[in-house]
Amino acid sequence: MTQIQALVVEEPNHISWITKELDVGAGDEILVAPKAVGLCGTDLEIISGAIDPDYISYPIALGHEWCGIVLGDGPLRGTLVAVEGIIPCWRCDACRSGETNLCETYQEIGFTRDGAAATLISVPRSLVHPLAESVTIEQGCLIEPCAVVYRALARAHPGVNQSVLVVGDGTIALLAAHLLALFSPARIDMLGLRKAQNSLASLAGAASFFTDPAEVEREYDLVIEAAGSAASVATAISKVRRGGSVLLLGLAGTGKEVPLEIDEVVNGDLKIFGSFSYSSLAYSQVVKLLNSSLIAPEFVITHRFGIAEWERAIETLRFANGARGKVILELDAQTPN
Ligand SMILES: [Zn+2]
Ligand SMILES: [Zn+2]
């Protein structure tokens, strides 16, 4: 039995860096040494217990946005790799139609089996993607959130020369603005909550960054809700033109509802999409885009901590002042005692 050290949520509100046994799956697996792990709002929900219990198994090592170096004697030894987090069954109807994000019996790294905030992780060999030499560790740990966004955009398929509004100013909203450029829109604007995010919105490619919904016209071909609150869903629906589309990307929390004016949707001839997680195809496509230097999402990283500083990293994710994008944990640094 291999012993590792990992950042484990034993149960809601009980998190610590502990020594534990390596979590190894049943199939053909490969060992990877994680190099960087991105944290996100979902990790906070795992820590607090706010996450829908259907999607999580405690105790769990955190870390679903990551990349690392392959260990062992195989051909990938020493290669920087990213690893799909969703482990589909490949046999159910959803998997057979390519919708692996809807697999009926999937496992997921960082949710139902141990994540990568650890000294070592074992992963299914078939889900490992080698990264090009030009790809940095910081870029690699952004593939997972980029895949979530890319899958959603592919579903809403923004047309060339469309105008797009992104509601939200967190990492997913910023990555949505960045990846939208692949679809050649005429204009990307963002509507956020915090003025401090202005410079990040500009780096993401937003032409205008608003914080007051009253300043934003109802004129967009596509509005992407990436803030994950009932109020911002209502705002998103109120800013789309007739015949336009609304894409819901943000999770608002179990049980949250939003009032919907039915006639606004019918008379407005609106299309409303949700998008859950990412398919295996979307993940592979993001890896290709990054390996070809067609995307450069690293602008979104604003805070870096060594793994020994994991408590500060989580506090920063909860309460940072000023501009805040992605918070990452680096595993090069010495590990906590
Ligand atoms: Zn995440
Ligand atoms: Zn399946």
Image (cartoon, rainbow, N blue to C red):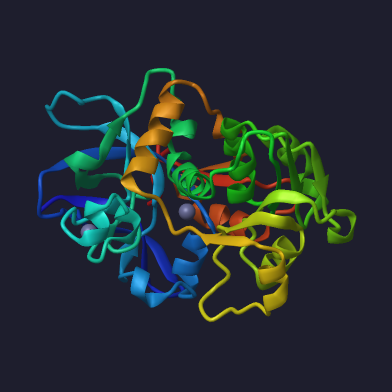
**Whether residue 91 is visible:** yes
Percent position (x, y) of residue 266? 66, 70
As rendered, which of 118 and 46 lies closer to the eye? Answer: 46
Residue 66: % across, % down: 40, 43
Q: Residue at x 32, y 71 (%)?
A: 58
Q: Residue furthest right?
A: 215
Task: Depth check: give the residue in front, 101 or 272.
Answer: 272
From the viewer's perspective, is residue 5 above or below residue 142?
below
Closest to the observer, 18 or 302: 302
Residue plotted at (49% across, 68% down): 45
Asked whether, in this view, residue 171 is left or right of residue 209, the answer is left
As drawn, is 124 to the left or to the right of 243?
A: left
Q: Residue furthest top?
A: 133
Residue 322 can be seen, yes or no: no
Within the image, what quadrant is residue 202 found in? top right
- From this view, report whether residue 160 is shown above or below residue 56: above
